[in-house]
Image: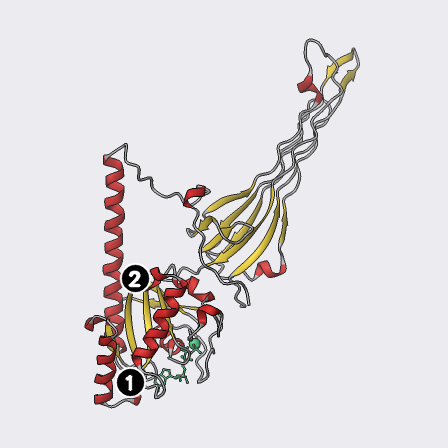
Amino acid sequence: MRFLDQARIHLQAGHGGAGCVAFLREKFRPWGGPNGGNGGRGGNIYAVVDPNLNTLIDFRYCQHFKAPRGEHGQGKDRDGRAAKDLVIPVPPGTQVLDETNTFVLHDLVHPDQRVLLCQGGDGGLGNRSFRSSTNQAPRICGEGYDGESMSVWLRLKILADIGLIGLPNAGKSAMLRALTSAKSKVADYAFSTLYPHLGMLSMDHGSRLVLADLPGLIEGASEGRGMGTRFLGHAERCRMLIYVLDAADPDRSIAAMHKTIAVELDEYDPALRDKTALVWLNKADLLDDSERSAAIDAALDCGFAPENIHCGSALSKEGLPAFTEHLAATFVALSALSASATSSVDSSVESSPSSPIVPASTDSVRSPQSLQPTPWSPLP
Ligand SMILES: Nc1nc2c(ncn2[C@@H]2O[C@H](COP(=O)(O)OP(=O)(O)OP(=O)(O)O)[C@@H](O)[C@H]2O)c(=O)[nH]1
Ligand SMILES: [Mg+2]
């Protein structure tokens, strides 16, 4: 399946149906009075999370969405039927941004989460509603209100637990293949991975982690070189990162590789550098013992904690069991930490009714104060 993580769509909610001008005339009631019904409401447009989707590719071929209009009112007090709502399925992790592609309006992360994008117009009133003591036979009716219309950007930030980042050819895809059953393309040339690939890592206690193999970064990626930093948006939602470094690269030192990655992450969003990260010094099968310890020392000099540095080979799978164990343990500890932080915030909110902390609601429009421009490079 082709991958697309950004799309612009145009929405037009349904217009309300017009009211009706009618007068009741029937046997024995020749002057039955005004009885035109009201128009029906136009269809709303909703976005709903479909867990079976993982790309926005459908929006490349269909960009215009129009909800049906409400039925018109009819005589004999018959109101028009409200139109059916239009539901647009989107993959989990989709953000809805305004027309300028700057402000996040909705963040759709939970399965079946549903947000209203455009409201349908109300129906117009029929002439029965205009009857008054001074006008017993009104010949006017409402036309029905227009439905809202707007253009929005959809941006997908895949929901992965752990992101694999590194320079091209470092072995990120090989790592994903070794850790999971995903079939990410492995090849000995740069940029063999052109868009993020996901894989599932099963842990001992039955739960699973989602790993994302992201396209390689190069120096100047933040200025648009190579694949640019466009795909780093997908790392934003990862709870942890794995830096995959090619320890057998004769041309670049570990320090240089780390610096390139750090600079590009900083350029994109410094918060990415604060994420918990493990280092995997790959291609150790090509190194002898002294070279391995030199690589580990170099990683230590880059500021990584000794326990977070692993040296091994994605191809021969040497060192992988210990790494997987550490990865799972770190992730479980992280999850426990964030769960306890969330519960302490919740309890402080409950204990003090006047507390200004309000749990964030994901399905409401954010207030203008909370709208923060988020960096995003345009489509190449
Ligand atoms: N000897 C050895 N070769 C490896 C190892 N891991 C990966 N390779 C080789 O390194 C090359 C690049 O591997 P990939 O997994 O495609 O690298 P990548 O980081 O995904 O590269 P991009 O997708 O281009 O960013 C391939 O030829 C792999 O066979 C390893 O542990 N040992
Ligand atoms: Mg790759």
Image vertical order of residue 245 relative to residue 373, above or below = below
Residue 359 is situated, as x and y percent measured from the top left of the image, at 34, 42
Looking at the rendering, in which quadrant would you find the C terminus? bottom right
Q: Is residue 266 above or below residue 77?
A: below
Mark 2: amino acid: Asp
Q: Is residue 94 left or right of residue 304?
A: right
Q: Residue under circle 2? A: 274
Would residue 73 be found to the left or right of residue 243 on screen?
Answer: right
Ligand 1 closer than 8 Å to label 1 CB: yes
Is residue 31 at least partly visible in the picture? Answer: yes
Front residue of 107/47: it is: 107
Question: x, y percentage for residue 368?
Answer: 45, 42
Q: Looking at numbered disc 1 in the image, what kind of residue is underneath it?
A: Ala
User: How busy is the neighbourhood of tag 2: few (under 14 within 10 Å), some, or many (20 plus)?
Assistant: few
Query: Quarter of the image holding residue 212?
Result: bottom left
Who's the residue at 25% across and 46% down the image?
Answer: 343
Question: Alpha-carbon distance for marks 1 and 2?
Answer: 27 Å
In depth, the one of 248 and 226 nearer the eye is 226
Secondary element at tag 2: helix
Classify the position of ligand 2 by quadrant: top left, top right, bottom left or bottom right. Answer: bottom left
Identify the image quadrant of residue 30.
Answer: top right
Position in image of residue 134 (x %, y %): 71, 9
Residue 132 picture location, percent across and down: 68, 12
Horizontal side of residue 328 vs 48, given as left or right: left
Q: Is residue 112 visible?
A: no
Query: Horizontal placement of 163 versus 108: left or right?
Result: left
Up/down of 254 relative to 362, above or below: below
The residue at which mark 1 appears reads as 284
Residue at disc 2, CB closer than 8 Å to ligand 1 = no
